[in-house]
Image: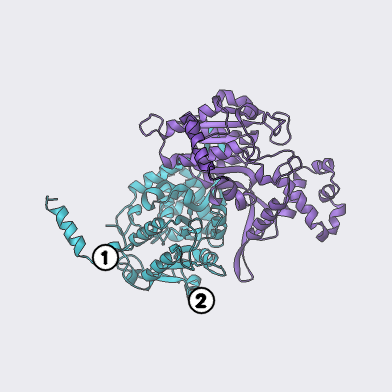
Chain colours: A purple, B cyan
Amino acid sequence: MTPAAPGLAIAIALALPAAAQDDPLPSWNDGESKRAIIAFVQDVTDENGDAHVDEDDRIATFDNDGTLWVEQPIYTQLAFALDRVRDIAADHPDWKTTQPFQAVLEDDMDALAATGDKGLLEIVAATHAGMSTEQFAQIALDWLTEAKHPRFDKPYTKLVYQPMLELIDYLQDNDFETYIVSGGGIEFMRPWTQEVYNIPPQQVVGSSTVTEYEIVDGKPTLMRTGEIAFVDDKAGKPVGINSHIGRRPIIAFGNSDGDFQMLEYTTVGVEGPSLGAIVHHTDADREYAYDRASPVGKLDKALDAANDNGWLVIDMKTDWKTIFPE
Amino acid sequence: MTPAAPGLAIAIALALPAAAQDDPLPSWNDGESKRAIIAFVQDVTDENGDAHVDEDDRIATFDNDGTLWVEQPIYTQLAFALDRVRDIAADHPDWKTTQPFQAVLEDDMDALAATGDKGLLEIVAATHAGMSTEQFAQIALDWLTEAKHPRFDKPYTKLVYQPMLELIDYLQDNDFETYIVSGGGIEFMRPWTQEVYNIPPQQVVGSSTVTEYEIVDGKPTLMRTGEIAFVDDKAGKPVGINSHIGRRPIIAFGNSDGDFQMLEYTTVGVEGPSLGAIVHHTDADREYAYDRASPVGKLDKALDAANDNGWLVIDMKTDWKTIFPE
């Protein structure tokens, strides 16, 4: 940087209209979605307005997969689980001839799909259990440091949506508590959500396995079992919200039918102001385009309900100036 | 108040030694417990000290029954459940001849005790289920407004410990997040913990029943079933802490063997500074005196372990200047 640069930067900044300088959502194109979000936040934070909401009740919930980060071509946590099957296969010679593991080791996705939910649960139990919560957090972090997305060739934690990062920041600046409410594993997300989203572990709600308290090498430890404790998806999302937060959100963002009940719980039949929104993946060039027919992140029932319930449908292609952080 | 009073108050304040004016724990007598608590907080908040702990990791957990409020002669939530059996008995004529309800209606505590855990679960299912979470919160609040403690003749929410209110306040002033981690029902506590303890619903961890998402009269609602979802007691406390907070606390306060594992998880084998403490009920005159032989709040194993693990044992009689708020 030359000595002249700071002065130049100030000159450029002064030449911009005030509105552009103060824009809390610079990666959003001017349009209905952006305007509706900003109007909602201004309304609920206006102390003299009819729609004012106390800070304690400013709860915003966000789905993760497909709402805050990429979920195609397969959920990131599934990519993690499949890689982990490969990583530890040497310790399990029987996997070469046992489904669903054989399918993973032979990259036979049709055979894997044929094992259905039962196969998936076996993979979760084999890859997500048998270690302490702290060991699992480190395994997840190590994988996220190494693994790259097959299309974008970047770490998954770089494939988060810049417009949503700005939105989280904007809501936090306006005294919202921002929560992740995801079908993904709570302990797969917590190790990195603070750094990536500025959302601390206690504001992450997700699916979980049963943990058991044990003393291991003199240290009190929670060991992960393969048993599913809670599935934070569909009707599970309001249940998870109530369990962890104990308050009904006033903002919910999702992108698939798995978020339908969370959006409904937040916006339908409630007395005060509320905002529900769906991120609609419409941009095959810069990200992906999918909705009703997609096996991952299927958006069908919630898209039909958006109009009736006044949910914003965010068109990724036209509403978002940029997709990923630079 | 006379016009002269404010000047007088200032004159009195100026005459006090600085330490007394700044005392964060005025209801604690000067002694080992008070000094140890203050020294710990000063150490972990000293930015230049070896024991400094980042604000994000300043997590303090408190048991509720017997640690923050009175638990004798029976747990407050049990008093609530028994009153509720009486309140709704007219709708259940069979209860007159069916245990455990008959025992409650006849005030026969021996017969009730004889029904054991099975009887207690039936009472919970009959009194805590079949309504929405919002209806249950109102039922709990209504009862707490009306009900009075049999010995002190005051509402239960007035029978909280003033020294512990000051401690929570002191920790919050020092950027701790303060959590309740109780064997009691999470939804029995949340409606009033903000007002009474300045602890919001999302910082309350407790036992829970399964809830089911339904649309009731057009409004998305969580209905309470009688099925137990989670028991936040003993080894369940570290599990509940991990599920809700996702971080290991550095301070834990309890008063019974039900808190043993929470204290152990917080203090044993950990690398950084930690503080475990037990409120020992030693004051039969002002409150109650009980420990190893008490059916409610039994303190035996945890009292034996306190010395080995360096847990503070707070002697209610000598450490606390006052017990309840004036």
Closer to us: B161 or B43:
B43
The residue carrying pointer 2 sits among few (fewer than 14), some (14 to 19) or many (20 or more) residues within 10 Å by Cα, namely: few
Residue type marked 1? Ala
Element type where label 1 sits in the image: helix
Residue B250 image offset from top left, x and y in percent: 50, 63
Q: Are marks 2 and 1 in contact (CB under 8 Å)?
A: no
The residue carrying pointer 1 sits among few (fewer than 14), some (14 to 19) or many (20 or more) residues within 10 Å by Cα, namely: few
Element type where label 2 sits in the image: helix
Q: Nearer the viewer, mark 2 or mark 1?
A: 1
> Separation of disc 2 and disc 1 at Cα?
36 Å
Image quadrant holding the C terminus of chain B, namely bottom left
**Picture quadrant where residue B163 is located:** bottom left
Please state the chain letter of the residue tagged with numbered disc 2 in the rendered image: B
In the rendered image, the residue lying farthest to the right is: A97
| Residue beneath disc 1 | B18
Tell me: residue A102, above or below residue B315.
above
- Residue at x 47%, y 63% (from the top left corner): B251
Closer to us: A289 or A216:
A289
- Residue at x 58%, y 36% (from the top left corner): A163
Residue A170 in view, yes or no: no
- Residue at x 51%, y 55% (from the top left corner): B119
Tell me: residue A244, above or below residue B302.
above
| Residue beneath disc 2 | B308
Closer to us: B98 or B23:
B23
Looking at marks 2 and 1 on the same chain, the residue that comes earlier in the sequence is marked by: 1
Residue B292 image offset from top left, x and y in percent: 45, 72
